[in-house]
């Protein structure tokens, strides 16, 4: 049984602003999350309950997993640069 994926409107706007190649890679990662939200290059966010991030190249997908309802809520996509650190 697959997970239900919800995407915030701000994430949809961000996808429209980035390059097509990167957007396609990110959308593919969304599809992979519906199969298994704990696979791939992920890390649990410190100090948060059920909040994770997944790396896709220079981008980070931040999402919340509601295990009981089998829902994944993607709430942020951000680009990491050398100025981030």
Image (tube, rainbow, N blue to C red):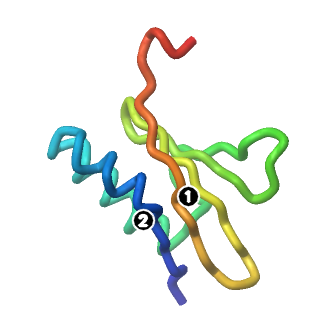
Provide residue 18's location: percent of width, then percent of height. 24, 39
- Residue found at x 42% / y 18%: 81
Quadrant in which the N terminus appears: bottom right
Provide residue 4's location: percent of width, then percent of height. 52, 80
Question: How dense is the environment of label 2, judged by Cα within 10 Å: few (below 14), some, or many (20 and up)?
Answer: some
In this view, 10 is above or below 6: above
- Residue found at x 65% / y 50%: 52
In this rendered view, identify the residue nearer to me: 36 or 59: 59
In which quadrant of the rendered view does residue 73 lie?
bottom right
Report how many numbered discs are placed on residues in the image.
2
CB under 8 Å between discs 1 and 2: yes
Secondary structure at badge 1 equals loop
Classify residue 71 as left or right of residue 24.
right
What's the CA distance linking mark 1 and mark 2?
8 Å
Classify residue 25 as left or right of residue 33.
left
Disc on res. 39: 1
Disc on res. 71: none
Q: Which residue has dot 2 on it?
A: 32
- Residue found at x 54% / y 80%: 3
């Amino acid at each position: 049984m697959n997970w239900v994926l919800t995407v915030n409107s701000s994430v949809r706007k961000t996808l429209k602003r980035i390059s097509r190649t990167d957007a396609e890679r990110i959308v593919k990662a969304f599809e992979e999350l519906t199969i298994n939200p704990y696979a791939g290059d992920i890390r649990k966010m410190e100090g948060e309950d059920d909040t994770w991030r997944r790396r896709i190249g220079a981008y980070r997908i931040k999402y919340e997993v509601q295990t009981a309802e089998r829902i994944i809520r993607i709430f942020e996509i951000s680009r990491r640069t050398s100025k981030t650190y």
